Image (cartoon, helix red, strand yellow):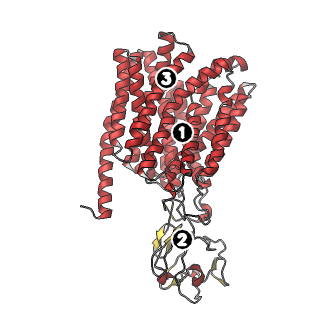
Amino acid sequence: MDFGNRGRNRWWTLLAVSAAQLLVVLDGTIVNIALPSAQQALGLTDANRQWAITAYALAFGGLLLIGGRISGVLGHRRAFALGLLGFAAASALGGAAENAPVLFGARALQGLFAALLAPAGLSLLTTTFTDAGDRGRAFGVFAAVGAAGSAVGLIAGGVLTEYASWRWCLYINVPVAVGAALAVRLVPQARPVGERDRPDDEGGRLDGELDRPVGEGERLDGELDRSAGERGLDGEWERPVSDRVRLGGERRRQDGVRGRPGGERGLSGGDLGRPVRERGRPGGVRARSVGEGGRVDGERVRSVGEGRRLDGERERSGGELGRPVRDRGRLDLPGAVLSATGFVALVCAFTEAEARGWGSPVVVALLAFGGLLLAGFVAVERRAPRPLLPMRVLADPARASAFLAVTLLFVAMFGFYLFMSYHTQAELGYSPVEAGLVLIINATAALAGSMLIAGRLLGRVPPVVLIVPGLLTAAAGIGVLVWFSALVPALVLTGLGLGCVLPPTASLATAGTRGHDIGAASAAYNASQQLGAALGVALLNTIAVSATTTAGLTVAVGILLVAACVTGPLLTVASRRSLKDRAARTGAP
């Protein structure tokens, strides 16, 4: 039975992941409205107050790829729980802050744990919901929470600041995070790559990660393999074949799949195992030492620790070529440093561009430095044995299209939200709370688009059918505000477009990935959103200041149209290729 669809506990996964997604997105905006009160209470200066927001954004965005890798090593469930508890502790620290350094440090810690929490949550959702119908509903809810989270943050920030205290904008995270952490206990267990799996009631493969044959004492790569007494080379012990492969109708479970008696195939380490009658000899015949390249019934078994072939087939684990088990948790340190510093340099450049202008030497230097660092990151990842972001994750055209679509969507939408704040307060005279409440219209439309449209159609229609119309609808919404000054239609259309784009892009970002690749793809998806949001606020605000607000919003419309024109053909080609591959596998005409 498929692990992703057994039991009702998978819906607890959706509840916990949605709560975590709300925390991550909400904290990007909830402090904005509370910042003036915090500045007055803590004596922040006009020059350093922005770090209450920037510290979170930089830590979150800069550490996302590292968080995705750690999630794959620890196991997504364990990393998710750790991220929730750390986020709660950092929020409590920030709420109790009595000076600026403590507040800024707490916000950076929130970003750090959010960088672990976000990819782990999306990975859990991907591995839990594999049925097309359930997957569509789950990603619809997940995307709806993400789409509405920013608006909810602005609303909650205004209400809490006005009727309680700015500190509650941070304290509010604690009960939500602790509640989600308690719900994690009901989330199906998922273990890290390379960890020896224990027997499972359904025997399902977890997280696409390597499962050892259940009940065997075998360990690879120089670790002790207990046996009846024949010792091979390199300090390894070989178990007699008769003990490792049982005959006579007894079932064995390998890789979470129940083996069949006789000569039927079982799975081993991610590859199809050889027929039992070929691999085992009845009567306690011992296999020769693996280090000697010994044969088991004529098949050569080479050392897995050298990354070679096992039973004539290349072992795979989580989408990667077989590696020594003991090294699977090593962090790609050069890639981690280059990705984090490159992202931080770009975000700082975008932030400084608002005040200094895009032609400032500081901004140009930061942009060039960030670009060089990210180029170096790509070069390192192409050669790294265990890359932080495997290039195969970005090479898939459908996944690359999803990253591009969500990046450009966030560029346009975060610029739109900034202008909405100015428009409602400066031009329409709304209070901060009233300005936040206006965004309920947009949040409700986003919920409808995610759950009622994309959530029901995802898996039934190609992703391009949802993504391209969603981008065009969002463009139409901003255009309505620019050319007709129609506030409510603009909020409805942009919300519907946002809701239609996020579920299919989130699903495409992790579709077909396994093992460490799931965490890497989830992290890259979240990083795309963060880069898009930072660039959108800086770019469109600069255009508005140097020209007019109308010019900035018109550029946002153009960005969405470009996104639709570019991603549409890419997704169509990827969809056709997928159909051809499926037909080739099934033999259909």
Tell me which numbered mark, 2 or 1, is placed earlier along the sequence: 2
Which three-letter amino acid code belongs to the residue tagged 3?
Answer: Leu
- Where is residue 312 drawn, in percent x and y? 46, 75
CB of mark 1 within 8 Å of CB of mark 3?
no
Which three-letter amino acid code belongs to the residue tagged 2?
Answer: Gln
Q: Residue furthest right?
A: 98
Mark carried by residue 439? 3
How far apart, in angstroms, are the residues tagged by discs 2 and 1? 43 Å
Position of 536 compared to 160: left or right?
left
Q: Which of 278 and 347 is in front in this view?
A: 278
Q: Which residue lies furthest to the bottom in this view?
A: 283
Nearer to us of marks 2 and 1 is: 2
Mark carried by residue 254? 2
Q: What element carries label 1?
A: helix
Position of 533 compared to 94: left or right?
left
Which three-letter amino acid code belongs to the residue tagged 1?
Answer: Gly
Q: What residue is drawn where x is 58% and y is 84%?
A: 242
- Where is residue 231 drawn, in percent x and y? 65, 82
Q: What residue is drawn where x is 23% and y is 61%?
A: 589
Tell me which numbered mark, 1 or 3, is placed earlier along the sequence: 1
How far apart, in angstroms, are the residues tagged by discs 1 and 3? 33 Å
Mark carried by residue 32? none
CB of mark 2 within 8 Å of CB of mark 1?
no
Q: What residue is drawn where x is 43% and y is 33%?
A: 448
Q: Which residue lies furthest to the left in this view?
A: 589
- Where is residue 236 drawn, in percent x and y? 64, 77
